Amino acid sequence: MRIKVKFLKEYTIDFSGLKQGVHQFDFKVGKTFFSLFENEDYNDATFEVDLALEKQSTMMLLDFSIKGKINVDCDRCLEPVDIEVECEEHLIVKFGEEMYEGTDEIVILPESEHQIDVSPYIYEFIQINIPQRRKHKKSDCNPEVIKKLKEIEVKNTKQKEAEIDPRWAQLINLKTEN
């Protein structure tokens, strides 16, 4: 746990000492970052995060530009596949009496707070921009696995056809005629 706290300090911005205006921050995100969020789904990950923080008198505007790739197992053939991810995300930080995440884009920090840890936001932004189906193009999948999947699919289809109650077989003919 101590490693986690030390590691995430890299993503903590002390905004109290910043003057009003735009400030740039650059972060590198890798597999270790994701493992600290207990996400072991990735074989590897490399991301660059550019953060423009605009400090105003009553709030801060954070603009994240995230670009990189993850390496995961293909959902179709289970071979490793690189997935490119590129996104632009925005966060508005206002100040109030207590910590509150109003919406996806608005966070309220206590007025007594002087730092913000952007690591959970970076993690969330990357996560929501990764496709749910992680796979190669069909031509890049392992051909042996694809062949085996087709064999299983044909076998299952034949099995289902054989299981049809003869009383319902007439309805299938009606369905396919139109």
Image (cartoon, rainbow, N blue to C red):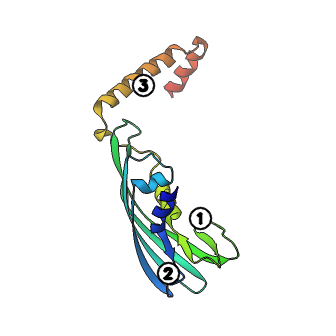
* Residue situated in front as seen by the camera: 1 or 34: 1
Seen in the picture, residue 7 relative to 42 is either above or below; the reply is below
In the picture of the structure, the residue carrying the numbered disc 1 is 104
Mark pair 1, 3: CA separation: 41 Å
Q: Earlier in the sequence, mark 1 or mark 2?
A: 2
Q: Quadrant of residue 106?
A: bottom right
In the picture of the structure, the residue carrying the numbered disc 3 is 153
Seen in the picture, residue 41 relative to 57 is either above or below; the reply is above
| Mark 1 and mark 2 residues within 8 Å of each other at the beta carbon | no
Residue 110 appears left or right of 20: right
Q: Earlier in the sequence, mark 1 or mark 3?
A: 1
Q: Secondary structure at mark 1?
A: loop
Percent x, y of residue 68? 36, 59
Mark pair 3, 2: CA separation: 55 Å
Percent x, y of residue 3? 47, 58
Q: Which mark is residue 54?
A: 2
Task: Please report the residue visible at 42 percent of the width from the left and 19 percent of the height from the top.
Answer: 155
Mark pair 1, 2: CA separation: 18 Å
Q: Residues within 10 Å of mark 1 (few under 14, many from 20)?
A: few
Q: Secondary structure at mark 2?
A: strand
Q: Earlier in the sequence, mark 3 or mark 2?
A: 2
Three-letter residue code for mark 3:
Glu
Q: Secondary structure at mark 3?
A: helix
Seen in the picture, residue 73 relative to 123 is either above or below; the reply is above
Residue 174 appears left or right of 48: right
Three-letter residue code for mark 1:
Asp
Q: Residues within 10 Å of mark 3 (few under 14, many from 20)?
A: few
Q: Seen from this angle, which residue lies furthest top?
A: 166
